[in-house]
Amino acid sequence: MFIRRDIDLYSVDALLTDEQRMVRDTTRAWVRDRVMPSIEDWAWHERFPTELIAEMGDLDLLGAPYSDFDLPGLDSIGYGLINQELERADSGIRSFVSVQTSLVMYPILQWGSEEQKKRWILELGKGRAIGCFALTEPDFGSNPGGMRTRARRDGKDWILNGEKMWITNGGIADIAVVWARTDDGVRAFLVEKGAKGFSTVDQTGKYSLRVSVTSQLVFEDCRVPASALLPGTSGLKNALACLNQARYGIAWGALGSAMATFEAALDYAGARVQFGGKPIAAHQMVQEKLAWMFDEIIKGQLLAFRMAQLKDQKKLRHEAVSMAKRNNVRVARECARLAREIHGANGIVNEYPIMRHMMNLETVNTYEGTHDIHTLVLGAFLTGYPAFEPPGSS
């Protein structure tokens, strides 16, 4: 069941294979037993539960869509359902898996040497190593082409200088996929924790993604060997391809957040009694909010399902991924807002998950392409006129 069996109006659950249903139910049970009892405490204290990483590896939640090195090789719907169930708990938990899978393992598998693959893929897939993806810089988020981080040759080595910002997993990562300008264009490097000239500073005081480690990465004459270069990388297009993989998971994950706030609101509306002894679920205005949430979640599910089919058929365009990420995150944000209204004052306390999801979604709406950037992607697709730069700019 994608939402709850008793309200699966379009029988979306029936579209799943037995294996896909097993993946979803296994992930959901693990989330229920191992994540939900402590998630509010972890969020309150800004702590990522590193003790769960090995369990994620044992459950094949890391690197699930890949078959190399005895990884499970799930189809795209199965992997999407993992993201959905993780984000029903918290965006920060799903973000960890997204980064590990789509932003670290993917580029190593696509453009890494055999030595790099043998050293890192199984370690990352089993949770024995943690990775991060370093593209965003303090002054360049939506415009990664403006990056200032540089790598220059020095004999057989490379010397990196620059800064990266808002890097998920940065402070706990064993390996960073670092994108830098070189004389041959933008390339990626695997920089290991402890490399001389490489340091991290964790971002604290966040109101959003408090269960996620977010860091600044600093490279000051950081020397790495020639073997650190991902040899198959040849430009910014490679980094953008990684982001497209992550956006796919986000489009599914955002639905999980929407389901969490919708189901909380539906339960609360049925239990909260006001005005003449009836539950507020009997009120027209509350029903309108619930109906909107329900409509949009089901439409988002069907969008994600078709996106997954196209991905497995190798027919998925990046504009379609932008559309799904843009739509489903927008739906999740609005579901959180409407759920907060239905909960009234109770919606702002951590007895309920509403405000935590609402704050998390402000980050999810921003990373891997903001809502506005994906609007421009679709606008360029429809009209043939890219509008990423203001009129008159050069």
Image (tube, rainbow, N blue to C red):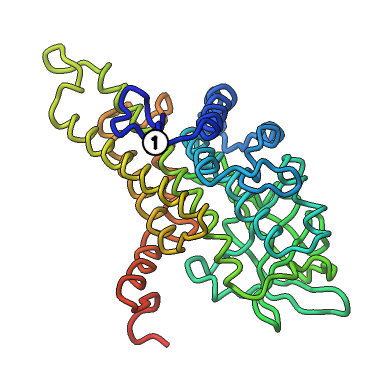
Q: Tell me where residue 184 appears, x and y as whole percent.
A: 70, 82
Residue 354 lies left or right of residue 74; in this view the side is: left
- Tell me which residue sits at (59%, 25%) in the image: 34
Q: Residue at x 60, y 42 (%)?
A: 74
Which residue in the structure is indicated by mark 1? 355
Examine the image and state in which quarter residue 220 appears.
bottom right
Which image quarter is the N terminus in?
A: top left
Q: Tag 1: Cα neighbours inside 10 Å, few (<14), some, or many (≥20)?
A: many
Q: Please determine whether, in this image, residue 298 is positioned above or below residue 30.
A: below
* 118 shown above or below 260: below
Depth order, front residue of 208/153: 153
Q: Is residue 127 above or below residue 385?
A: above
Q: Position of residue 20 (x, y in %)?
A: 52, 35
Query: The residue tagged with tag 1: helix, strand or loop?
Result: helix
**Quick check: 359 left or right of 94?**
left
Residue 57 at least partly seen:
yes
Residue 335 vs residue 379, the one in the foreground: 379
Residue at image location 37% in from the left, 26% down from the top: 4
Question: Which quadrant of the figure contains the C terminus?
Answer: bottom left
Residue 39 in view (yes/no): no
Which residue type does callout 1 highlight?
A: Met
Where residue 190 appears, as percent x and y from the top left, is 75, 61
